[in-house]
Amino acid sequence: MIMGSIGSNLQEVKRRIAAACASAGRDANKVTLLAVSKTFPAAAVRDAHAVGQREFGENYVQEALDKIDALADLRPGIEWHLIGPLQSNKTRPVAAAFDWVHSVDRLKIAQRLAEQRPPELPPLNLCLQVNISHEPSKSGVLPADALALAQAVAALPAARVRLRGLMAIPEPQPGAPLAVQQAPHRALRELMATMQARGLALDTLSMGMSTDLEAALAEGATCVRVGTAVFGQRPAAADAGG
């Protein structure tokens, strides 16, 4: 892994974000670029950190914990986001090691994270993962059930967890026109607006990856999850970040 290539890749992704935000009349400074480092070594994260990247997304709990340990000297200058599926038997180390969890899809997971978040740490930021495209094989709460789940999660102890918003991984639409790609992102934005109208203080829309970040930003994404456009191609199939 060459630091220079990561640096130039980050600059190109930031250029894309700036251009998409300009087209949508948005402030690019209000968008978080989450560099998805799954399957890449800790050295690649260190290289990205050296050129100014601070927010990193990981999909697999054990791989992430190993990386967090290997980069302990950079803590607290790194913000760690879990963006992959979380099983209930792995919530304890996640509650202690991460700053964000984007993939909460049932109340039990949020309850365990709240119970297990060390009291000396700030609240763990949570997003609900919504299966916005209704794909049978994909994780996430269905849109029709999302409001009830959001209300239940928002009622958990605020000193331990804080519900920040929604995350989605829309069904890939390679080569589709921008307007077609925007549709599922618009649906997620409208779902969050409904929740906000019901009194939930949400501020985060985690959507958009390497191939569709322009569509996501046009619909209000506040956090885009970009892996291959930053670190290069990976052998694993893209899921929560790409």
Image: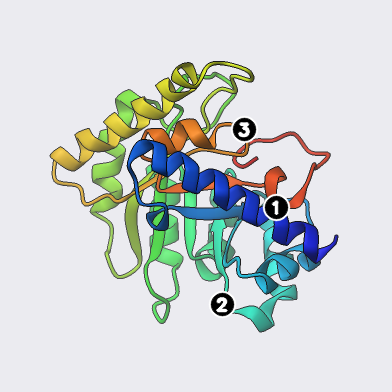
Residue 86 visible within the image: no
Viewer-side residue, 116 vs 145: 145
Residue 130, x across and y down, in percent: 42, 33
Name the quarter where the C terminus is drawn.
top right
Residue 78, x across and y down, in percent: 57, 71
Give the residue pinned by disc 3: 211
First of labels 1, 2 by sequence position: 1
Q: CA distance from mark 1 to mark 2?
A: 21 Å
Residue 179, x across and y down, in percent: 44, 19
Compared with 160, 175 (above or below) is above
Q: Residue at x 23, y 44 (%)?
A: 151
Q: Are marks 1 and 2 in contact (CB under 8 Å)?
A: no
Label 2 element class: loop
| Amino acid on which the number 1 mark rests in the picture | Asn
Question: Of discs 3 and 2, which sits in the foreground?
Answer: 3
Q: Are marks 1 and 3 in contact (CB under 8 Å)?
A: no
Give the residue pinned by disc 2: 77
Left or right of 166, for residue 3: right
Viewer-side residue, 27 vs 53: 27
Left or right of 142, for residue 9: right
Q: CA distance from mark 1 to mark 3?
A: 14 Å
Q: CA distance from mark 3 to mark 2?
A: 28 Å
Give the residue pinned by disc 1: 9
